Amino acid sequence: MSAAADTTGIRLSAHPRARRHIAAAKAWGGLGAFGLVALLSQRAGLPLGDLLWRSLVGGIVGYVAGWALAVVVWRQLALAQIESLRRQLIADAERREAERQRRAEDAAAQAEQARAQAGAG
């Protein structure tokens, strides 16, 4: 991939809220899965070594799952934000064009009035 493609692409890592939320999702996913696996392993009566090993693996899986889920959600949110901005820019451009046309029509009407008054006078 070229350097130009890197600078023109949309990246969630450059989106401040997405970056924060993805980091939080990874943290909570890892901690939550670690705690859940530890609790279930403790209730199953596993020895401490097995409990910690399984909790660690569960925490890693939760971390990755939290990251994947957050990225999927934020991709859709970012695309929705881009689409909303695109629509807003189009509406603004249409509004400016309508205003420009209205002014042109007003100027033409004033010029026509001036010609009519000059011809009558």
Image (cartoon, rainbow, N blue to C red):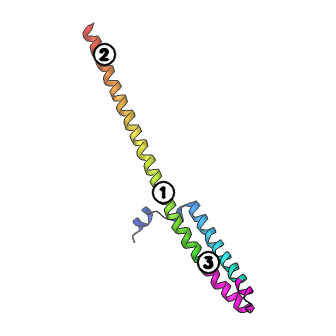
Q: Which residue is mark 1?
A: 80
Residue drawn at x 33%, y 20% is 110
The furthest residue to the front? 44
Q: With respect to residue 94, does 118 lie above or below?
A: above
Q: Which residue is mark 2?
A: 114
> Mark 1 or mark 2, which has the lower sequence index?
1
Mark 1 residue element: helix
Front residue of 76/40: it is: 40
How many residues crowd around disc 1 within 10 Å: few (fewer than 14), some, or many (20 or more)? few
Residue drawn at x 37%, y 35% is 98
Mark 3 residue element: helix
Taken as a whole, is the magenta stretch helix, strand or loop? helix
Q: Are marks 3 and 1 in contact (CB under 8 Å)?
A: no
Q: CA distance from mark 3 to mark 2?
A: 77 Å
Q: With respect to residue 3, does 45 lie above or below?
A: below
The magenta span reads 40-60
Mark 2 residue element: helix
Picture coordinates of residue 121, whole percent (x, y): 27, 6
Give the amino acid at mark 2.
Ala
Picture coordinates of residue 5, whole percent (x, y): 40, 66
How many residues crowd around disc 3 within 10 Å: few (fewer than 14), some, or many (20 or more)? many
Front residue of 39/53: it is: 39
Q: Which corner quadrant of the image does residue 23 belong to?
A: bottom right
Q: Which residue is mark 3?
A: 62
Front residue of 104/53: it is: 53
Q: Are marks 1 and 2 in contact (CB under 8 Å)?
A: no
Give the amino acid at mark 3.
Gly
Q: Which corner quadrant of the image does residue 102 belong to?
A: top left
> Mark 3 or mark 1, which has the lower sequence index?
3
Which is closer to the viewer, label 1 or label 2? Answer: 1
Judged left or right of residue 55, residue 107 is: left
> Mark 3 or mark 2, which has the lower sequence index?
3
